Image (cartoon, rainbow, N blue to C red):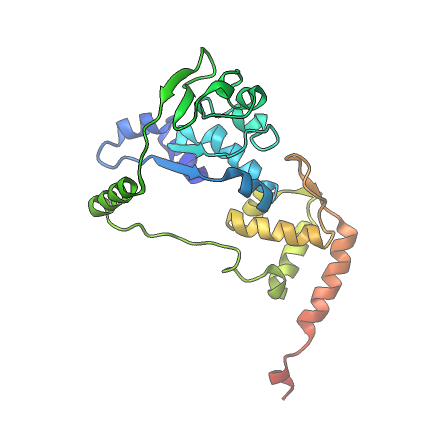
Amino acid sequence: MDERYEILAQDGVRNIITYNENHKNNPMNNIVVIIDKYLEYTYEMPSDFIECIKEIARKGRAAGIHLIINAQSARSEVVNNDVKANMPCRIAFSVTDWHESKAILDKTGAQKLLGNGDMLYSPSLTGNPQHIQAPYVSLKEIEAVVSDVIQRNGVAEYVRDFDDVREPVEDNVPYVISILERLLQVNTVDVYSLQDMLDISYAEASDIIKFMEFNGVVSGYDAGKGRNVNHAQIESLLGEFKSLNSVPDEDDQN
């Protein structure tokens, strides 16, 4: 998303629509990001994950990145107000009580739905939701659509960047030392500033932040505020890692 914003800025336009009008021979494709089982992600992912979702919801549309979130629960602590405020189009299926309806649509009514695709659709934050019957789509139909998309567009190539593939931060001693020395120059840090500081991916910066928090180098997450840097702890940790770095390997000793 940030890369797309840089391209739009260089072209002097405000959104992807204007950009594509100026570049009809080489338009920028729209991207749809679908997050299923959002509740499970909020339990398993670090708090920075929510900040990333809010950033995409807030800025993604102008860059042609559209976000769809499916949540089995409509409790306010699951889909918080910051996320909802940037997602004007909402759908509610049958819910247990009016509180959940209010959490999704900011209006009651979804508690009276019959189920089996009966839903309320709110295309904007203004006006009353529309009562719609969603069609049933079988697994066979889904597979047919997916097969058709693959035949028309080819097989997708995925760039996988999972935590279990990357080397743990602490295994690269010289890298940790260089990071700690950089952190001595700042008083606060977050994932985004660390990303810019080290010119690394969001996922890698998130790993480093978690490692630094575990070792007391930075403070815990506090609602999007910068994490305080503990310079005294950095000095202590630097001494430990520099001593590890100075120990010769067994091969060198032989």
Residue 195 visible here: yes
Q: Report x, y in % for residue 105.
A: 50, 20
Q: Report x, y in % for residue 88.
A: 46, 22
Q: Is residue 44 left or right of residue 114?
A: right
Number of numbered discs visible in the structure rendering: 0
Q: Report x, y in % for residue 14.
A: 39, 25
Which of the image's four quarters has the C terminus? bottom right
Give the image quarter of residue 120. top left
Q: Is residue 238 left or right of residue 191?
A: right
Residue drawn at (67%, 70%) of the image: 245
Q: Report x, y in % for residue 62.
A: 40, 28
Residue drawn at (69%, 73%) of the image: 246
In front of the other: 76 or 246: 76
Give the image quarter of residue 80. top right
In front of the other: 61 or 190: 61
Residue 193 visible here: no
Residue drawn at (43%, 17%) of the image: 124
Which of the image's four quarters has the N terminus? top left
In front of the other: 234 or 42: 42
Vertical order, 140 against 204 (above or below): above
- The extreme front residue here reads 114
In front of the other: 159 or 14: 159
Q: Is residue 230 left or right of residue 131?
A: right
Residue drawn at (57%, 37%) of the image: 50
